[in-house]
Amino acid sequence: MDVTVSNPPRTFRPAGPRTVVLKDCARIVLEPDEQVTFHALSGAQYDVVRKDWGYYATPSLNGRLPQLGLRPVLVSSAQGKYYIMLVEPDRKEDFERYLEAQCLRVVTWLDDGRALRHLEDMLGSDRPEPVPDAGERLTDDELRPQQCAQGKREAFLRDVERLKKRRDEFVRVDCPACGSRQSKRVFEKYTFEYRACTACRTVFMSPRPSPQAMADYYADSEDYRFWCTHVFPASEPARREKIHRPRLERIVDACRRYSVGRATLMEIGAGFGTFCSLARETGAFDRVVAVEPMPDLARACRERGLTVIDQPVEKITDERGSVDVAVAFEVIEHLFDPRVLMDQCARMIVPGGLLALTCPNGEGFDIAMLGATSGAIHPGHVNLFNPASLSLLAETCGFEVLEVGTPGRLDAEMVRKAVREGEFDISKDWFLQRVLVEQWDRLGWPFQRFLAEHGLSSHMWLVARRRETTSPLRGRNRPDSFGVDDG
Ligand SMILES: [Zn+2]
């Protein structure tokens, strides 16, 4: 930064109906990513950040700026000139007097989420539709910092041992997506058996822990506690910016494209509350509800000031038809009976409202390559759907699928990691050897993007619309006694 103070300041009279004398006090030159902060005696603060493309003129209009004690407002003059002004909330009357004296008028206050959305909706009609893609590059270390790896692994293995002791409570199930009874064994991990549905190719654990054994697994899980106390806090900034913010943008965009209201957003399995906090701060929705039954996580959400429902989603009774958009990120693969979640969402979401899900894709690259060795094959992941089978499940539960894609960013890296750790041998596969090892820096990310954009990544995303009436598809594939194999 380079500052030149003008001493004495140069004085000048700007154009306008009243005679005002301004003092030009200094010249400040910022390098890209340098910030200056102006402090008022009242405590209000205002940042400007230099970028290599220009400036961030203010912090977020409906987030950080009002928190710093300034309300942005768009103002127009009688001569058709527009200005953005920042007003201290307790000086509003002074501001109004100023407007009157200068013949200015307020077009809109810009810290009002509803006004901003309205503006965006009116202006945004001819924007191109984005294709869900891989987005910005992301590495596994950003999400699971290395210093956490050892402790996490040990905690996880103790959880697995506890689960094994309850094997007599495990239950055989039919395909969780299509209900078919035909499946074949694909592999075993930690002595648990995984099968693939012969009709829809969903991979699922069967026998699987009973709902009670599963609930206890999570309630007692040392691994999850470790995530809460170590992994989430260490990786939150990366998760927030690289995962949750793009997700929120995709969801807001889907609302716009499918003309869905943004009164209430519900996140099922809100975890640490990162996504809900972001949704609330940005004003993307008027009301944000976090559903989180795990006590530690529910507390973390409450401490962030979120509205929390701390019971399992299927127990919620007072949100019928009140939700515009429900989201569940990395939840459905954990559920004993995923239809229970889908049915409950169908009850809570208004007709025409949206459901957005993310989960592993059982047919994605890293699972296809690594099989049981893949990190996605985990005792908590009892359902590994694929884009077609998850769509089928949604369609049979009262939804119309609007988008399904695999915007994953980690498959190539996970396979590369397994190779480097000696868990997966590609020494005879010159193609993978070239992409994942020899020319990793050049080919790794383009290869990952290819997987993501062509439905081949192990991480998937689905957006579905709640049908106006109950689907006629319902029934055909729906077993009456899910979870019990009487054959
Ligand atoms: Zn199936």
Image (tube, helix red, strand yellow):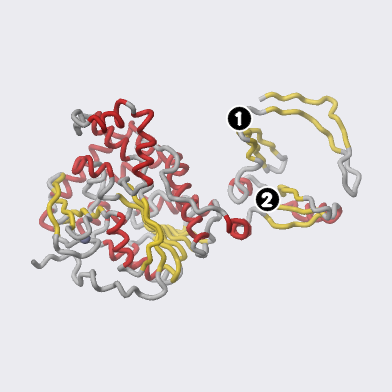
Q: Is residue 92 above or below residue 472?
A: above
From the top left corner, tell me how far across and down residue 183 is, in percent: 14, 58
Q: Quadrant of residue 34?
A: top right
User: Mark 2 — residue?
Assistant: 71
Look at the numbered disc 1 and give the secondary structure of its residue.
Answer: loop
Residue 322 in the image, given as x and y percentages of width and height: 46, 69
Between residues 392 and 354, which one lies in front from this camera angle?
392
What kind of residue is marked 1?
Pro
Looking at this view, name the residue that lies furthest to the front. Answer: 431
**Counting other residues with Cα less than 10 Å from the Cα at mark 1, is it few (<14), some (14-19), or many (20 or more)?**
some
Q: Report the side of 378 relative to 303 (left or right).
A: left
Choose top left, top right, bottom left or bottom right for residue 190: top left
| Foreground of the two, 20 or 374 | 374
**Above or below: residue 31 compared with residue 226:** above
Mark with earlier residue (2, 1): 1
Relative placement, left or right, of 114 versus 302 is: right
Q: What kind of residue is marked 2?
A: Arg
x, y percent for residue 412: 31, 37
Specify whether 26 is left or right of 58. Answer: right
- Are the residues tagged 2 and 1 within 8 Å (C-beta)? no
- At x 34% / y 57%, what residue is drawn? 293
* Quadrant into which the N terminus falls: top right
Image coordinates of residue 276 in percent, x first then y, are 46, 53
Quadrant where the C terminus sits is: bottom left
The residue positioned 32% from the left and 61% from the top of the image is 391
Evaluate whether residue 7 shows in this view: yes
User: Where does label 1 land, which residue?
Assistant: 32
Ligand 1 located in image quadrant? bottom left
Distance from label 2 to label 1 (Cα)?
26 Å
Looking at the image, residue 137 lies above or below residue 89: above
